[in-house]
Amino acid sequence: MSGSMTQANVHSGQDATVSFPMRIRDARVVVTSPGRNFVTLKIETDQGVYGIGDATLNGREKAVVAYLEHHVIPVLIGRDARQIEDIWQFLYRGAYWRRGPVTMRAIAAVDVALWDIKGKALGAPIYDLLGGRSRDAVMVYGHANGGDIPETIDAVGRYLDAGYQAVRAQSGIPGLELAYGVGRGELHYEPADAALPTQSLWDTRKYMALAPKLFEVLRDRFGPEPRFLHDVHHRLTPLEAAQLGKRLEPYDLFWIEDPTPAENQEAFRLIRQHTTTPIAVGEVFNTIWDAKDLIQEQLIDFVRASVLGAGGLTHLRRIADFAALWQVRTGCHGATDLSPVTMGAALHFDIWVPNFGMQEYMRHTAETDAVFPHAYTFERGFLRPGDAPGHGVDLDEVLAARFPYEPRQLPVARLTDGTMWNW
Ligand code: CS2
Ligand code: MG
């Protein structure tokens, strides 16, 4: 859109006055690895206001860097940064090749950076641009992991003592090394752990015996009040997922997540017919099309698409509005491979979105928090986005340069007989 725009002067939120239009003068990608890799897009305007977006795709970072540098940045230069919708449509429709994790993360990075710019230019936090707050704070769930059930119980207890009202519980499976969700360090669970994929093993029968036991013990120990969540990480067939949901019903889970791969949305009909355990799906979704049948057939209860995975705020709010028609609520993915920039943007979305469900919150390392200074704050199980203009997250480029990219890939999983399985 290059037509002439009405001139206006507004407060930039950075103690400067900006006039419209705001041309994109420069955009560049910063890759940094303060404990894990992050890809960040910085867009600068001719008014001096800049915006930041996250483009991290865990284990495939360089693919998004190349997509941004070769195919996106060149078409951004000179555009009016205010035209968020038109730029989104240009990048989505204009590529001809639609969807996919690489493309949609690149679009998300641009979109979030532009919302950041708009907020700063207008002196407004993004939640105000979206329509204002629907709630005071954002409930988050933490990750309690243990090598076995007793360790997991201890970990859950620590979260509840810290004031969390919602805890995801994952336990190692005796006899299976490197079960999903079980960290090897004290605090931070980081699955992308090596330059070449680590191999883990999977045994559905062992898991199916353990998971209901875990939640039976958790309810016995902690009573009916806490919200408990659990991630199946795409490991079951639809029928097995139905069986698991049924067995977990007495323990009143807030949700089970990704019980079976959602490439085939119809598969969830079978699960739904057999269990009332709530289902959350969507951390690998890129667009509304991935969730369409799941939502309109009421096959899920929470859609876990994120600002980063699903093309930014512009597209995620479409998914959320569509989901609201069927009382499906949000549950944004918030693993540590989503940078603090995504967390900041997600919190503005969460505090606005009427049909909010829950926000995942895995803490970043101290190094990551230092590279990405942010306005959001955590207190006893709740996050708040803060009132800074834009999304309130910045990038310390000098510090970022001290943490160069390190090749890392996600693990793979095999069944005990050697068959490749879903990690
Ligand atoms: C997980 C993620 O947070 C979750 O629910 O499923 O940790 C997922 O394994 C990672 O985002 C993969 O990069
Ligand atoms: Mg998950």
Image (cartoon, rainbow, N blue to C red):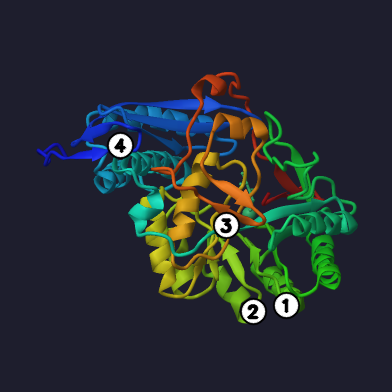
User: Image point 73% across, 72% down: which residue?
Assistant: 225
Say which of marks 1 and 3 sits in front. 3
Q: Position of residue 338 (x, y in %)?
A: 56, 42
The secondary structure type at the circle numbered 3 is: strand
**Sequence order check: which comes first, mark 1 or mark 4?**
4
Using the numbered discs, state the Cα–Cα distance from disc 1 to disc 2 in whole angstroms: 7 Å
Circle 2 residue? 276
Circle 4 residue? 12
Circle 1 residue? 249
Circle 3 residue? 359
The secondary structure type at the circle numbered 1 is: helix
Q: Are marks 1 and 2 in contact (CB under 8 Å)?
A: yes
**Sequence order check: which comes first, mark 1 or mark 2?**
1
Say which of marks 3 and 2 sits in front. 3
Using the numbered discs, state the Cα–Cα distance from disc 1 to disc 4 in whole angstroms: 52 Å
The 10 Å Cα crowd at callout 2, few under 14, some 14 to 19, many 20 or more, is some
- Identity of the amino acid at label 3? Gln
Quadrant in which the N terminus appears: top left
Is residue 308 among what the camera can see? no
